[in-house]
Amino acid sequence: MTPREEYQKRQTRWQAERNRAERLFIRIGNWRLLLGITEAVLAYLVFGPHLVPVWLLLLPALAFIALAAWHSRVMRRRTLADRALRFYGRALTRLDDRWQGTGNTGDRFADSSHVYSGDLDLFGKGSLFELISNTRTAAGENTLADWLLAPASLEEVLARQSAVRELQNRLDLRENLALLGSDIQADVHVDALHHWGIAPSVTFLPALRPIAALLGSLGLVSIVGFFAQKVPFWLLAGVAGFNVAIGYWLRSRVRQVLEAAETAAGHGLDVLSLILERLERESFQSPYLQNLRKQLVVEGEPASVRIAQLGRWIDWLHSSDHSLLRAIGPVVLLFTQLALGIENWRRHSGQYVSQWLNAVAELEALSSFASLAFEHPRWSLPDLNETGSPCFEACDLQHPLLPESRSVPNDLAFTGDLKLLIVSGSNMSGKSTLLRAVGLNCVLAWAGAPVGARRLRLSPLQIGASIRVTDSLLDNRSRFFAEISRIRQIVDLTKKNRPVLFLLDELLSGTNSHDRRIGAAAIIHKLIQSQAIGLVTTHDLALAHIQQDLNGSAQNVHFDDRIVSGQIEFDYRLKPGVVTHSNALELMRAVGLEV
């Protein structure tokens, strides 16, 4: 089946399940109403005319309780079906190119100072992150963003590729992960939990936990016994006073434990526990995935069990805000027992928390890449190598964020002595799109994901882009100053160990033509001498003559257009040589300007 056929088949199956659950939900509700009426009639017959024995009231009551439990299970089935329909509905929107604004945009990772993030649309509405991300946890989002923001080593990327190949067709696993728990993201923060888990222990007497449990039980029995008129007030007062004194003595340490746990653990542990439990049942062949799977078991006990234990302690802590529990809490040493239980958990499991979260986060990021590969069968995993010189050789390269039906693929190659492509062309012809296509596919390649190309061969590269630079009134910066600041960042990248792939759109367009030619030539010479490769787009055809000074290291290419019946048409095909005409005047006339 094609990805669309598979998604539609599963969507149809879940819609049928949802319809069955809805019909059953309504039917059970009617039965419960009928039983309620029956119970009322029987109550009248029992306590009014006394026509039937009182024990008959138990029959509809028991049936009502059973139906309520059944009703709850059916409601959960209906909720599960709703989640599945949303999951496959969004998957189909991606295939239909209607996904923009429907997913997680990753806005919190946007950084205007990053050397390519904003230029390549990594985050925001309609971004690469929104297209890819299928994560359920904040940790998974962080990992995916980190992989896109910095290239990994060759060894790491090859391991990720192997994992993506294995996960690509495991749609059942991706479906299960999407349906687990609630609809909200598991907002568990890796760094906070890690520091909390390895922080020095808060010291309590070794025997204090069983003693506190015993004293708390005595306090609870005293309260119940007093209201049942079995325990005198003086005994309740004595037990309560003693327990309150113990709690007061421990208050500083108890507060320290509970505040730290509340800050670090927060919410989302239930979703995290379910994700861990599902992953623990999965078997893998890839060494990378096997290693991540092994990290989920410590001392023979699954991570899901331990996280669920912490989740229960945190749930009790949240529940303790109830007015009744606040009233009796000091008497039963509730907060002391919570602190002792949480601190005991942290002592035995805290050191492993970040390990478990990182394993889940990496599996989620890999699953997002696998989904991308599944939905784009024409894409490929790139061929990565550590050749002596920088290399980028693509066949049928396309922009990953454009639908395949509208994307025009192009071949592109930096091999041998070729270091620079000078791209000329008229407005709207595809120059900037080409730069983003090259940059985004390089980002995907060195993150371990499939790329939008039939074939892509490349060496280790770090990206530097100046495509979308803007002025800033707040920072008192002109567009030209913002551009040359970014170019300085790119030049500084060449001083690191990894070769640079530079992408410069309309190089130095913010200054006069004389300074532009001199400055552009100097910048390009500096980059090429540093063993960088890249593309430069320009409207200034004088810059195309830079090729003559680079001894075969540069090549002119262009995008063309033509006027047909008064309309401008583009074929978006990259061609050799320099563009021979401009469409600026035609575009001005097309919008009604008299020129």
Image (cartoon, helix red, strand yellow):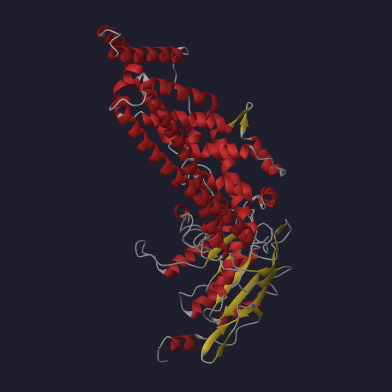
Q: How many marks?
A: 0
Query: In which quadrant is the N terminus drawn?
Result: bottom right
| Side of 143 relative to 449 (left or right) | left
Asked whether 270 or 506 is in front, the reply is 270
- Up the image or down, 50 lies above or below 367; here it is above
- Up the image or down, 82 lies above or below 586; here it is above
Residue 410 location, quadrant? bottom right
Across and down, in percent, residue 82 comes to 49, 51
- Residue 470 visible here: yes
Across and down, in percent, residue 573 comes to 63, 78
- Up the image or down, 386 lies above or below 399; here it is above
Query: In which quadrant is the C terminus drawn?
Result: bottom left
Residue 442 location, quadrant? bottom right
Query: Furthest-left residue in view?
Result: 233
Asked whether 231 or 296 is in front, the reply is 231
Q: Residue at x 30, y 8 (%)?
A: 231
- Residue 245 visible here: no
Across and down, in percent, residue 352 comes to 56, 31
Asked whether 21 or 276 is in front, the reply is 21
- Up the image or down, 297 lies above or below 566; here it is above
Across and down, in percent, residue 153 comes to 66, 50
| Side of 391 relative to 488 (left or right) | right
Q: Residue at x 40, y 92 (%)?
A: 594
